[in-house]
Image (tube, helix red, strand yellow):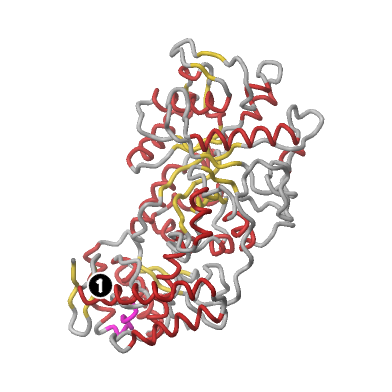
Amino acid sequence: MTKYHFPLIRFCFYEGQTERERERERERESSLLLLRDEMNACVGACLAWVLLSATISSASSTDQDLEGNVGFMAQHWSHRQRRGGGDDRSNIKQRKCPNLGINYGLVANDLPPPKEVARLLEATRVSSIKIYSPNADVLRAFSNTDMSVVVGVPDESIPVLASSTDAAMLWITANIIPFFPATRIVSLVVGNEVLSKTSSDVSNHLVQAMENLYHALLFSNIQNVSVSTTHSMAVLETSYPPSASRFHPQIVPTMKRILSFLSSTSSSFMSNSYPYFAYKQNPELISLDYALFRPNPGFSDPNTNLHYSNLFDAQIDSIYSAIKALGYDNIPVVVAESGWPSHGDADEAGASLNNAEEYNRNLITHIASNAGTPASPNRPIRTYIFALFNENLKPGPTSERNFGLFQPDESEVYDVGLQISRPAAPPPTMDAVNLTNPRSPDSSSGSATWCIAKPSSSIELLEQILQFACQEGGADCMPIQPDGTCFNPNSLISHVSYAMNSYYQLHGRNFWNCEFNGAGMVTPSNPSYGNCVYPSQ
């Protein structure tokens, strides 16, 4: 435990709890267990009043305020629910497929609200979603659910994010911190198939952007969130046979840097693998049975004698072989996209409802079996099906608008055995009792500005700033004490940012009030998150 001592207040940076705090939590645990059955029967105001009553009963033995106790009870109840406290949720969780995800695209004007989508997916075998940009409504909708979330970073953001760690820190502050950890964000995916595109302005900055985002996560004390990027099969110069697969020579220098980063950060190589596109381009050479997981003769790799009965496995092992050829054998492959369209133009071979149903049903069965591939048997293949909905505004051929498993009205395009229960009814409104006070990062802030710390600043300078701001500077530093609303994330840079902003707002919001020997920067983006409110004037 590291402590920073000041004459007026004390800041503690610690991971444990005192015995008194642990005893209070055990008492609250007992109270919650007694109230659990009643809570399961209550809705709306009933839940709020139960939480309030439990708080009042324990308030006499604590010196914490009422709001803090209500927040604790709400978080504790939410945590128990996420762990499967109710019978229905427990049964659903047991039937989820842990390696099955789905891509949730938004290129449409007729999709249901994200909250409805979250309820829909919680009643399916899907365990994770991947989104293509940090949409605030989607991230809020999937908070306090069992679903993990992979957040995409758009291609156009890459050059800016590569410019400095400060730029990456601003992106994390605006797009991740307001939702984490209530929304179980597990990975950032920087760009989509960047190395297969022609814009060198993006591809040349890809690795630096990945590194800056990774460091910004660490600065924010956000751990266990990986950083990667997606690749199409076009990054391979050859993919047949799988054991002879190699990356295109022109991208090898960049690919080596990517693989080094993935290996050092324990992240996955993410591939968009579509047997459909391979079949569409070569229907005379590739058997439809082989592409759809149907019984077929398959083929044996002449170099390894491994037998392949479907194109999906061959594509995955081709990626593994190309990675291994560059000296890495410890990087898992995740399939970021795979799917089959249910409708297409006349010249789009294989695009049909029956083929789409058969491919996705067989793909889900293959993923759930954890059989792995011939070269990596029994190694699970985490796969994100493309896509959740048919998206009516996607450009390109007809097939691009018909990859969805669901229609916008939430009916299934075809049945692949995805649903395991009926979607839950919408929860009752609890607007009258604000337990979590969620705060959107993209809410309008008018002409307001805030002051935050540059993550590139030295620890010594940040400590000096914290001491100055909280003492003679007159900043309000109570919220960053251990019981304060802004104590978490428990990192020095987060606490200094709050103290800097308090000083900045107090002394007139002039640019020189945020100078701090070059360690401060003014931002128009509201850094507030959850219950932590950064003041502004």
User: Where residue 293 sits: x, y (%)?
Assistant: 61, 26
> Observer-nearest residue: 439 or 123?
123
Answer with left or right where residue 440 lies relative to residue 386. left
* Residue 18 visible, this angle: yes
Residue 399 falls in image quadrant: top right
259, above or below 426, in the image? above
Residue 512 visible to an observer of this rendering: no
- Is residue 475 found inside the magenta-colored segment of the image? yes
Tell me: residue 188, above or below residue 470: above
125 is higher (above) or lower (below) than 305: below
**As drawn, which residue projects farthest toward the right?**
346
Instruction: Residue 333: name its quadrant.
Output: top left
Amino acid identity at mark 1: Arg
Say which of 432 and 227 sits in front: 432
In the figure, 222 relative to 416: above or below?
below
Name the residue at 33% across, 72% down: 487
Residue behind mark 1: 22
Determine if the magenta segment contains residue 112.
Answer: no
Name the quadrant of the N terminus. bottom left
Of all residues, the one furthest to the top in this rendering is: 302
Q: Is residue 497 left or right of residue 21?
A: right
Main secondary structure type of the part rendered in magenta: loop
Residue 452 position in % (x across, y down): 38, 69
Q: Nearer the viewer, residue 263 or 302?
A: 302
For the point 35% across and 26% down, which residue is it?
327
Query: Badge 1 local density, few (<14 within 10 Å), some, or many (20+)?
Result: few
Q: Secondary structure at mark 1?
A: helix
- Per the rendered image, the range of residues in magenta is 473-479
Residue found at x 77% / y 35%: 344
Please tell me which residue lies in front, 406 or 345. 406
The image quadrant of residue 68 is bottom left
